[in-house]
Image (cartoon, helix red, strand yellow):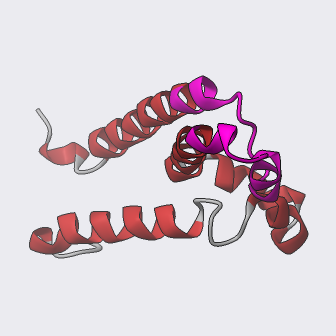
Amino acid sequence: MVFEPRLRSLWCVIFAMAWAFVFSGFTTTLPNVEDKYGKELEWIWNLSYMRWGLEAFYINQMDFYDFLANISTAFSIRNYNPDNFSKNCGIIFALGLFWLFITFLCIKGCNRTKQK
């Protein structure tokens, strides 16, 4: 076993929070990912649900300020598209299904000798 059975849930939460923090596109902005890590690793940021969730949240919140000021600069700094709210929500749903499937495969693949 990699982790003690009573600590597995804790480690899963720690992994999910670390993944969300590092690959959300907020600590390392999305325009800087390619410069900092190269084009080969950019796909990792696209597998993070928080990257899409933060973009959807940002679009939703900044939409309120559209009548006050020109918010296009705010979107360009983060490389967000204000028309992508529905797309972001769909990608979050699809990533949820993807990670659910990966989890299912991992559960089915572990301890095959104990399964009936």
Please tell me which residue lies in front, 48 or 99. 48
- Magenta stretch bounds: 64-89
Location of residue 50 in the rendering, given as x and y in whole percent from the top left corner: 51, 52
Could you tell me which quadrant the N terminus lies in? bottom left
Q: Residue at x 50, y 35 (%)?
A: 92
- Give percent across and percent down for residue 13: 29, 65
In this picture, is 36 found above or below 81? below
Which residue is outermost to the front? Answer: 68
Residue 67 among those drawn in magenta: yes
| Depth check, front residue: 8 or 76 | 76
Q: Nearer the viewer, residue 112 or 84?
A: 84
Quadrant housing residue 66:
top right
Q: Residue at x 62, y 26 (%)?
A: 87
Count of picture labels = 0
Q: Position of residue 59 (x, y in %)?
A: 61, 41
The x, y position of residue 17, in whole percent, is 39, 66
Query: In the image, 49: left or right of 85?
Result: left
Q: Quick check: 102 left or right of 55? A: left
Q: Residue at x 16, y 75 (%)?
A: 4
Q: Main secondary structure of the magenta part?
A: helix
For the C terminus, the quadrant is: top left
